[in-house]
Image (cartoon, rainbow, N blue to C red):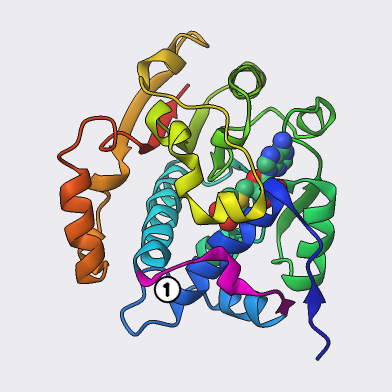
Amino acid sequence: MEREKITLTGAPETMLATLYGRALDSRRPNSVLHDAAAVQAVSRIDYDFRKTRMTGTSAVGVAIRAKVLDDWTREFLAAYPAAVVLHLACGLDTRVQRIAPAATVRWVDLDYPDVVALREKLVSPPSGDYHLVGASVTSDSWLSDVPNDRPTVAVFEGLSMYLHKEDGKRLIERITNRFPTGQLLFDVYGTTGIKLQKLVPAVRNAGATLHWGLDDPAEVEGWHPGLKCLDALRSVDMPGLENLPLSGRLGLKVIAKIPGLRDAGRILRYRF
Ligand SMILES: C[S@@+](CC[C@H](N)C(=O)[O-])C[C@H]1O[C@@H](n2cnc3c(N)ncnc32)[C@H](O)[C@@H]1O
């Protein structure tokens, strides 16, 4: 089988690191995610994945973060079985395959057009009410194409830090203004994490730049009336970290004691 050569650079290239992390985790006997579609996608890509510098610890960390967001999405869909899911900056994340939503759910996967073109070649679309959209999250057109009569959950993993704060704020305002009710599920870097971005191999090696750091989750609540932070989970406190290799667990224990570093990454859940 001919494998797909990768020509992406910058932020789009970083999705290969997270994909590879999920695939590495899924090849472990005690996998967190069991993401067979990620393993399959990696096998179809012609790319030197050593460039991502994924380690056992970072791969399991990526998988645990994905699982938190998967579980929160599942909880939303259990409460609202006919919801809309906006999975923004989807990259090659096979979240829709892992969650396998009911036919009543409308699922929108969105990323830049060149990422979507690659995804079309590498990942089989699920059956059901599924839509793959090529656009920047900062453009206006894609959102007005999504019907706004249903509860909507927007999941965006590994996106906020690539946006400038004003674009992140505008995205959140546009989503919360458009849909009647819903949730926002996303991860953020703190400002210390943004300052230390050169230490993140996948970002450095792709030549990407991180911009937006958020230290106070309450700040976002001010961006729409009724927006309320339900969870602000530090990366060092994620459930399932006991699955990390010993060296990773010890490293996290140290980080968890250092102010600034402790808050370098968070996963957030808001309702509106
Ligand atoms: C670190 S990757 C994360 C991908 C995926 N969420 C995952 O966890 O594997 C960052 C992703 O953000 C996407 N991205 C960055 N800025 C974007 C924008 N303005 N509009 C759409 N996608 C964007 C990139 O193309 C890339 O797929």
> Camera-side residue: 239 or 207?
207
Label 1: element kind: helix
Q: Which residues are magenta?
A: 45-56
Which quadrant holds residue 172? top right
Disc 1 packing (10 Å; few <14; some 14–19; many ≥20):
many
Image: 120 above or below 111: below
Q: Residue at x 40, y 53 (%)?
A: 65
129 sits left or right of 67 in the view: right
Question: In front: 130, or 18?
Answer: 18
Left or right of 29? Residue 253 is left
- Residue that badge 1 annotates: 25
Measured from the top left, where is residue 21 in percent x and y? Answer: 49, 67
Whether residue 107 is visible here, answered yes or no, is: no
Tell me the amino acid under the disc marked 1: Asp
Q: Position of residue 2 (x, y in %)?
A: 83, 87
Image-based side of 120 in relation to 76, left or right: right
Q: How far across and down, in percent of the image, does residue 131 sit?
A: 76, 51
Quarter in which the N terminus is drawn: bottom right
